[in-house]
Image (cartoon, helix red, strand yellow):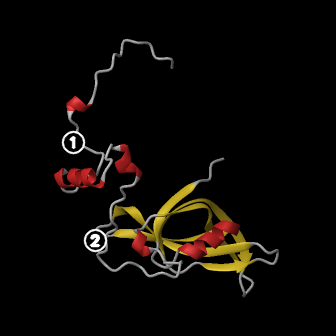
Amino acid sequence: MLNNCTFQGRFAADPEMRTTQSGLTVASFRMAVDRDNVGQDGRRATDWLNFVAWRKTAEFVCQYFRKGSTALVECQCQTRSYEDKNGQKRTATEFVVQKIHFCGPKTEQRVDDGGEAPPPGYQQPPYQNQQTQQMGFNTQSQRQQWQQSAPAGQQPGYSQGNPDDFSEIDDTDDLPF
């Protein structure tokens, strides 16, 4: 049988971590997940889903995600029965996290190293180490010359596709696969 679910949404609150009597770490959290369809009022309906993560995944979730964080969650649907404080039988449906991925911008994530987040509008300088070396730029002046001649917004190593940059491949040979 197949029981796989994938959701992308926002944390509705900070995840809560606890330890079971047997010593296992478990985290529970709730996410707001928008539906694909739009209602007559022009808005998307939102589902509020309950998630559970165990062991190292639970620790990871509690360390890196907070209320408002965007995440992609790969999980399995699970239904369980329990008795509430009044002795009433209840059923809960929750999603057991297998994997969780960051989806939001880096500025959304916490700064855990004791440093400060960059000021608004800060842009990291472009990375030019191996990439520029592989492009044949041997000196700083060659790199600067290329960057000044490149159109605005164009990344190093990418072009608009000049046909002279490509060679004709003889496709009459038999391929081994």
Q: Is residue 85 above or below residue 162?
A: below
What secondary structure is found at the residue carrying circle 2? loop
Depth check: 93 or 176 in front?
176
- Residue 98, given in percent of the width and then of the height, sits at 62, 59
**Residue closest to the far right:** 22
**Residue closest to the far bottom:** 86
Q: Amino acid at mark 1?
A: Gln
- Residue 172, given in percent of the width and then of the height, sits at 36, 12
Which tag is nearer the camera, tag 1 or tag 2? 1
Return the mark for residue 160: 1
What secondary structure is found at the residue carrying circle 1? loop
Instruction: Kindly identify the residue that appears in the image at 29 percent across and 50 percent down.
Output: 156
Lateral position of residue 48 relative to residue 25, left or right = left
Q: Quadrant of residue 23?
A: bottom right
Q: Quadrant of residue 19?
A: bottom right
Q: Which residue is mark 2?
A: 41
- Residue 118, given in percent of the width and then of the height, sits at 38, 78
Please tell me how crowded label 1 is: few (under 14), some (14-19), or many (20+) other residues with Cα within 10 Å. Answer: few
